[in-house]
Amino acid sequence: MIEMKNIKKIYTIGEMRVEALRGIDLDIKKNEFISIMGPSGSGKSTLMNLLGCLDTPTEGEYLLEGERVANLHHNRLAEIRNQKIGFVFQSFNLLPYATAFENVEIPLIFRGTASRMRKQKAEELLEKVGLKDRMNHKPTELSGGEMQRVSIARALVNDPSIILADEPTGNLDSISGGEIIEVFVDLWKQGHTIAVITHDKDIAVRTQKIVKLKDGRVVDGGSSL
Amino acid sequence: MAFFVFINQFLRDMRSQKLRTLLTLFGIIWGTVAVTLLLAFGEGLHNQQIKDMHGLGDRIILLWSGATSIPYQGLGKGREINFKEEDAFLLQKEIKEIGQISPEYSEGNIQIKYGKNVFTQRVTGVYPVYKDLRNMIPENRGRFINELDIKERKRVVFLGDKLKNDLFKENNALGEYILINNTPFLVVGVMIKKEQNSNYSDRDAYKAVIPATTLAVMFGRRNIDNMVIKPNVPKQNEYVINRVYEVLGKKYKFDPKDKEALLIWDTAEFDKFINLLFMGMRVFLGIIGAFTLIVGGIGVSNIMNVVIEERTREIGIKMATGAKRRYILSQFVFETLLITFIGGAIGFLISWGMTAVFPLFKLEEYVGNPVFSSSVAVIAALILGLIGFLAGFFPARRAASLNPIEALRL
């Protein structure tokens, strides 16, 4: 479902060229649950941004469900992010002034879904992550674990092809983190495709495959712990 | 369909950021009100000055006789000139640009009596056109001196409004007799109240006006005090004055270039001066207004800027979840337009309300009544909106053109 071939990402900062990714080959199949690990500076965040079409590669080919996405127009990329990708961030990235329900609803709004459908869908997903009774609370009134559940609900609301999670437990205590891991495992069991970038071995051990990065290259492309 | 969904979302975002919205709104309201009121009061003051000045007469020329200062045709200098009533008719005949002219006799310190009320005031003897020349308009049912009064030297009097109040209080004066130097005069008219900020003897409100012919006989006068002239067209004032020197110079044998032979007060000069003064004032107020707008605009743009960091993150989140660039930008445009419109409308209403209520304070006599200008209000609001828009648009566009991940990182 995801095929990356020889992906390179080079940042030019003033005179300096920083090669964040030096030629990545990566395949993610449907209903796969993989983790991407590596020390900081290894390029895993860059890889996640490219996977999520938040950024475009300097070189290489990226096929997402057969569509070449490496050099698409920004409007098409926005549609892909909206409909094919669900993000879960370390720092949640919820709109602070909107309620849990409104946050989950946002991707549906950008898709142009009718209000009744939005309500139904957003409620259904908040229920799925166990927050139905908290849906009118703002992020400041929620715990870290709850905020991350809201962002998971938001990631799922447009039935994406893949869920990309960047250190989803990084800002959580071990108990909440453990619960979030269980949520991901459940989602995988229900048929979702998930890629998690993490330092956290507790997550990595639950995934089917661990991709290890170092210095912008894949050093181990599919071992299991 | 999507359009309404977006508008709804925009409104929700604005509601959720009450403080920012309110502060921006306040900036635009304040700027609009300040500029609009400033110019409204300036305009009101100007109008009031013009009105006050025209209490004396609308661009009239006042003419007194003087003494020669240049020897002329064998006659020495320092010779006094004295006008007669017929000089007015001579001028009227010789100078066709003169629209109206009235000779004027004036007697000060005259005892005026009604019942037990006695006042010492000025009595003026004039012709009927004096009414228009000097804006002395009779109250209901009364009249000014007329041709028959002149012809028959009638003992009738037209009273200034304050003199009438002194003599009669609130009672009716029309048809009553008053004593002027112990001679009975019939009151035929009372002047309606008028604003007057300049005069050459006493305020008209305190004067008693009688027919010129009556005064001449009663006080044994041969010479008049002065003349009041109004050219057909205000622009002709200067020309008429030159012609007056020529005509009277010929009759009284003085050099038409001898400025001291006649004393002239051209009130149109003062009109010009006032117009110039207020032109200056308007420029001054305009500059203050412009600065108010700039300060207000800086306020608005500051508010827009203060939140840009928060906004950038918000933009990043929205883009990561599928917002297109044009959505981000149109949200911004919509917000600014709506805030400008609402702020401008409120500012408009406040200014309009204040100018409408102001006359109730009865300060017209001193500062005039402000004149509300809707175009000024609209322009002020638009300028503020534009400043706010530019201040917010460019950061928003920058944020929207970033990769979403960069916007999220900020």
Image (cartoon, grey):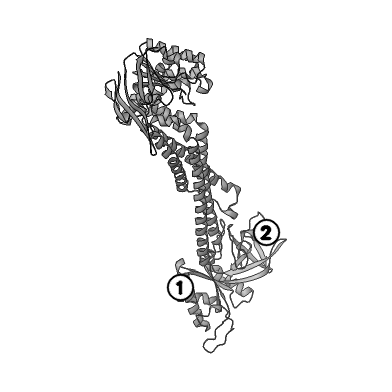
The residue at the point 34 percent across, 15 percent down is: A222
Residue B45 vs residue A65: left or right? Answer: right
In front here: B282 or B305?
B305
Q: Nearer the viewer, mark 2 or mark 1?
A: 1
Q: Amino acid at mark 1?
A: Tyr
Give the residue number, with chain letter if any, for mark 2: B166
Q: Which mark is residue B239?
A: 1
Residue toward you, B334 or B92: B334
Residue B399 appears at what percent x and percent y? 41, 34
- Left or right: B220 as drawn, with respect to B242: right
> Could you say whether the residue bearing mark 2 is in a helix, strand or loop?
helix
B320, above or below B204, in the image: above
Q: Residue at x 54, y 86 (%)?
A: B71
On the rendered image, what quadrant is the C terminus of chain A found in?
A: top left
Query: Is B112 left or right of B244, judged from the image as shown?
Result: right
What kind of element bears circle 1? helix
Residue B269 % position (x, y): 51, 67
> Where is residue B25 drawn, in percent x and y?
50, 38
Q: Tag 1 or tag 2, which sits nearer the N-term?
A: 2
Q: Is residue A182 visible?
A: yes
User: Of all residues shown, which one is farthest toward the right?
Assistant: B116
Label 1: chain letter:
B
Q: Position of residue B265 (x, y in %)?
A: 55, 70
Crowd rating for badge 1 (residues with CA inside 10 Å; few <14, some 14–19, many 20+): few
Subunit that carries the residue with mark 2: B
